[in-house]
């Protein structure tokens, strides 16, 4: 009986060490060496202080800040509770929430879809350039900056699709608000 179990136990033990220890450690070492910023969570820092991550949305609500997409997480913008709302397109609850978000956004028609709809994770750090441009007037008025300068900042912060074909143009809200703080300080 033991002669039959021995190969199976050696196999399980070997693959546990290989796939549970050696592979994760080697991938971590490679990632840390080749892509240190990404391997550490793409954190955005101000000196020693961590402001956030390029990959996780934050809730900016001040009138002088660009606002992210609505969060579908149970606790808004809680990375531990991320997830979509699971409400279907014909759900009255979703329709009511989107109508309330449209009214609260105070944006001129047509309202960019990502200004009032959550992403699949509920924590999307990016908004569309159209959403950012729709917020320019509010942000400029709240900060006392010429709308043209704020619109130019949005253009500079817009990232194009990867290799020109993967994804859509996008603006990272945290990076945009940091650039706006720098612009306002000048």
Image (cartoon, rainbow, N blue to C red):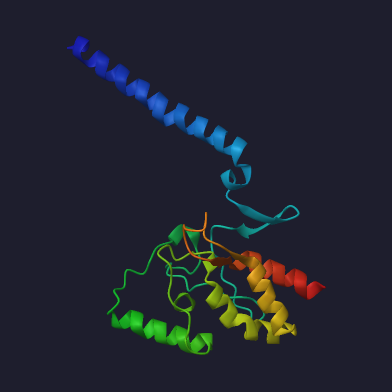
Q: Residue furthest front?
A: 164
Q: Position of residue 50 (x, y in %)?
A: 67, 56
Q: Nearer the viewer, residue 80 or 46?
A: 46
Could you tell me residue 105's position as x and y percent?
52, 85
The residue shown at (60%, 42%) is 35
Q: Residue furthest right?
A: 186
Q: Quadrant of residue 132?
A: bottom right
| Residue 5 against residue 139 in the figure, above or below | above
In the image, residue 78 above or below residue 41: below
Left/right placement of residue 4 relative to residue 33 reads left
Q: Which quarter of the figure has residue 14? A: top left
Q: Which residue is rendered at x = 52% and y = 90% of the image?
A: 108
100, 182: nearer the viewer: 182
Q: Residue furthest top?
A: 3
Give the total of numbered labels: 0
Quadrant in which the N terminus is drawn: top left
- Residue 149 at x, y percent in the picture: 72, 78
Residue appearing at x 63%, y 79% in the figure: 62
Q: Residue at x 74, y 52 (%)?
A: 48
Q: Quadrant of the C terminus?
A: bottom right
- In this rendering, the answer to whether 138 lies above or below 41 is below
């Amino acid at each position: 009986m033991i002669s039959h179990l021995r190969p199976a136990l050696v196999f399980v033990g070997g693959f546990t060490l290989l796939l549970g220890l050696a592979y994760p450690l080697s991938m971590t070492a490679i990632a840390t060496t080749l892509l240190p910023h990404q391997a550490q969570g793409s954190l955005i820092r101000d000196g020693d202080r961590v402001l956030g991550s390029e990959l996780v949305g934050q809730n900016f609500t001040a009138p002088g800040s660009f606002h992210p997409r609505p969060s579908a997480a149970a606790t808004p913008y809680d990375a531990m509770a991320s997830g979509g709302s699971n409400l279907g397109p014909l759900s009255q609850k979703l329709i009511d929430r989107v109508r309330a978000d449209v009214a609260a956004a105070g944006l001129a028609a047509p309202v960019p879809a990502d200004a009032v709809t959550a992403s699949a994770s509920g924590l999307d750090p990016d908004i569309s350039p159209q959403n950012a441009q729709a917020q320019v007037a509010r942000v400029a008025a709240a900060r006392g900056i010429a709308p043209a300068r704020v619109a130019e900042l949005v253009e500079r912060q817009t990232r194009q699709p990867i290799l020109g074909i993967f994804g859509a143009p996008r603006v990272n809200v945290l990076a945009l608000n940091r650039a706006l703080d720098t612009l306002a300080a000048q």
